[in-house]
Amino acid sequence: MGVERRLHGNETTVTLSRADAQSFLETADAPTIYDGELRWSDEVRDAL
């Protein structure tokens, strides 16, 4: 009995270098999908 969860909104794809992504995530405080999971931006920054 699996439930498929979907986010609402517009899908956007952006390609950044690791350094640029880390710099951006230092200023962002938002939920982010990373590697298929919903994480906070600081968790994603630390994972990079």
Image (spheres, helix red, strand yellow):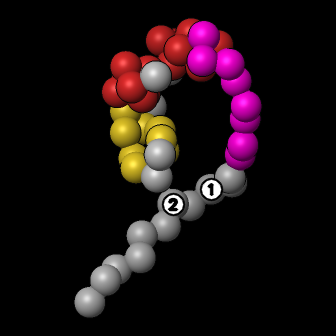
Q: Residues within 10 Å of mark 2 (few under 14, many from 20)?
A: few
Q: Is residue 17 left or right of residue 34?
A: right
Q: Which residue is mark 2?
A: 7
Circles 2 and 1, Cβ within 8 Å, touching? The answer is yes
The residue under the point 34% across, 80% down is 3
Q: Nearer the viewer, residue 25 or 17?
A: 17
Q: Is residue 17 placed above or below 23 in the rendered structure?
A: below
Q: Which amino acid, by three-letter code, is at mark 1?
A: Gly
Residue 29 visible in the current orientation: no
Does the magenta-highlighted stretch encompass residue 41?
no
Q: Quadrant of the N terminus?
A: bottom left
Residue 13 falls in image quadrant? top right
What segment carries the magenta color?
12-19
What secondary structure is marked by label 2?
Answer: loop
Q: x, y (%) of residue 46?
A: 37, 19
Question: Which residue corresponds to mark 1?
Answer: 9
> How many numbered marks appear?
2
Of all residues, the one furthest to the left in this rendering is 1
Classified by dominant secondary structure, the portion drawn in magenta counts as: loop
Residue 41 spot, x, y in % from top left: 43, 27
Residue type beneath disc 2: Leu
Distance of label 2 from label 1 (alpha carbons)? 7 Å
Q: Residue at x 42, y 70 (%)?
A: 5
Specify whether residue 2 is in view.
Answer: yes
Q: Residue at x 56, y 61 (%)?
A: 8
